[in-house]
Amino acid sequence: MSDVDRKDRDMIDAVGREAGALALDYFKGDPRRWNKHDQSVVTEADIAVDEFLFERLTAYRPDYGWLSEEREDDGSRHQTKRVFVVDPIDGTRAFVERGDEWVISIGIVENGASVAGVLYNPVRDELWSAFSGGGAFYNGERLRVSDATELQSATVSASRKAMARAGLAETEFPTDHRFLRSLAHRLARVAKGDVDAALATPGSADWDLAAALLIVQEAGGQVSDFEGGPIRLNGATARHPAFIAAGPGLHGVILKLIGQQRTKIEAEAQE
């Protein structure tokens, strides 16, 4: 546990709340929106919040690098010891459609792993936070992942596409009927024990995960790709393979089932 990590967590907690107030002003209005080159939607609120976070956070820690969804990556982040990894609005589609599940995500990464992270939902005034070795918290209350060990009774937050990617489309266990359009928020629900596990398809980015991964891990959860490997941040690419987040009693069970299903599918394809 590092005092620097704790201070960084407290700092991004405060800045995240300020950014939330700015985002909420746009949310209550009618912000301009357009599609990016990949056809994902972006709004003037995303840009304004990103600019606010960049100015405020780099003023506090000018020696930290920067990576965010709404700012061009010039690669300079690889020259710094620590990096701010930010999604000004995770769940922009929900934001546009007046949903309440979007969050502001701020993480600080060192040596490929998060050391501090905050998610803030200003619509519901919900804040999740963590720093390395210091535990994870929801509105000040300590978080703990569920102790589920049986898939038959576990609740899994996953899209049909994610289930199919894992080879679990034909398996029978409960899925979370409230599928949140913010990946970070879905992971936060794992940390809080609202769901037992979450699956994600390939393509998630550092800015989706930097805060949420740490919050899950500090709540006692485990996160890995479908082969059991770790999710490393601030690498050459900001994109990641499909992954699982779950409590320790369930993570290995899901990983084993994915392996079995993949072996079965491969054997059937060769027949």
Image (cartoon, helix red, strand yellow):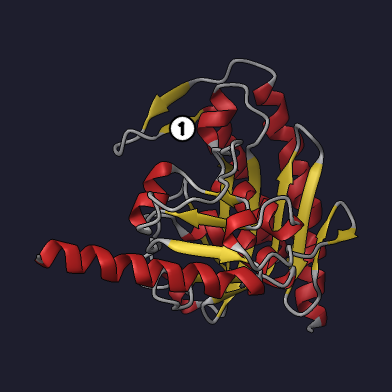
Image coordinates of residue 172 in percent, x first then y, are: 49, 50
Residue 32 in view of the camera: yes
In the rendered structure, the answer to whether residue 96 lies left or right of residue 212 reads left
Q: Nearer the viewer, residue 215 or 258?
A: 258
In the rendered structure, the answer to whether residue 72 lies left or right of residue 31 reads left
Q: In the orientation shown, which residue stands out farthest toward the left?
A: 271
Instruction: Judge whether 207 appears above or below 144 on screen.
Output: above
Residue 233 in view of the camera: no
- In the rendered image, which residue does mark 1 sit on? 42
Instruction: Judge whether 163 appears above or below 131 on screen.
Output: above
Residue under the point 59% across and 29% down? 95
Q: Nearer the viewer, residue 54 or 23?
A: 23
Q: Nearer the viewer, residue 100 or 158?
A: 158
Instruction: Judge whether 134 appears above or below 19 on screen.
Output: below
Instruction: Judge whether 112 appears above or below 124 on screen.
Output: below
Image coordinates of residue 118 in percent, x first then y, are: 71, 57
Q: Nearer the viewer, residue 7 or 244?
A: 244
Amino acid type shown at disc 1: Val
Q: In the orientation shown, which residue stands out farthest toward the right?
A: 140
Instruction: Categorize mark 1 by other alpha carbons within 10 Å: few (<14), some (14-19), many (20+).
Output: many
Residue under the point 80% across and 43% down? 126
Image quadrant holding the C terminus, namely bottom left
Secondary element type, mark 1:
strand
Residue under the point 63% across and 59% down? 212
Residue under the point 54% across and 75% down? 252
- Residue 210 falls in which quadrant of the image? bottom right
Image coordinates of residue 267 in percent, x first then y, are: 19, 69
Image coordinates of residue 146 in percent, x first then y, are: 73, 62
Image quadrant holding the N terminus, namely bottom right
